Each structure stands twice: as structure tokens, then as C-alpha cells.
Image: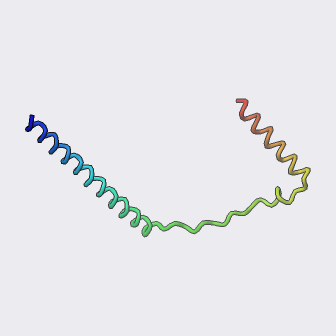
Amino acid sequence: MDNLMSEGLSLMVFGMGFVFVFLTLLVFATGFMSKLIAKVAPEAPPQPVKQNTAVAAAPASEGDELIAVMTAAVHQYRKH
């Protein structure tokens, strides 16, 4: 019985050690790849987004019409 517990304990330590080493290597590899990609292909600066001023500048009646059209489209889509 003592031999079986000893083997089980050593197997547990070996398994946990292997997982710990693998995860540590994975963290370092991921960090290395992240830095490599940042040097090779840097991110492009974000382009400013132009807002659609036609809807914002429209009178209330046109805005209400737009809302009605969008609501009808959503209801039509949900029926199918």
C-alpha cells in the first residue's frame, strides 16, 4: 500500500510539474509572438469616423419617418 501511494504521489507531482512548465512556456511564447507581430506589422492608426449629419440635421418629421421605416424593416425581418 505504501508503494502504491508513493507511485501515485510521484505521478501527481510529475503531471503537475509538466503542466506548469508547459503553461509557463506557453505564456512566454505568446508574449514573444505578440512583440514580434507588433514589430513586423504595426497597427494602423484608427481612421476618424465621419458621422452621418443628414439624419441629425433633418427636421423632426423626416427623423420620425426614418424611425418608422426602420421599425417596419425590423418587424418584417423578425417575421421570417
Residue 33, quarter of picture = bottom left
Measuring 46% from the left and 66% from the top, which residue is drawn there?
41
Closer-to-camera residue (3/20): 3
Measuring 55% from the left and 67% from the top, which residue is drawn there?
44
| Position of residue 43 measured from the top left corner of the image (x, y, whole percent) | 52, 66
| Position of residue 24 measured from the top left corner of the image (x, y, whole percent) | 30, 57
Closer-to-camera residue (9/74): 9
Number of marks drawn: 0
Measuring 72% from the left and 63% from the top, which residue is drawn there?
50
Q: Judge whether 75 appears above or below 50 on screen.
A: above
Residue 47, quarter of picture = bottom right
Q: Is residue 32 left or right of residue 52?
A: left
Looking at the figure, which quarter contains the N terminus? Answer: top left
Closer-to-camera residue (4/24): 4
Q: Residue furthest top?
A: 80
Closer-to-camera residue (15/43): 15
Q: Is residue 27 left or right of residue 40?
A: left
Indicate how the structure is coloured in the image. Answer: rainbow
Measuring 37% from the left and 59% from the top, which residue is drawn there?
30
Q: Is residue 36 left or right of residue 46?
A: left
Looking at the figure, which quarter contains the C terminus? Answer: top right
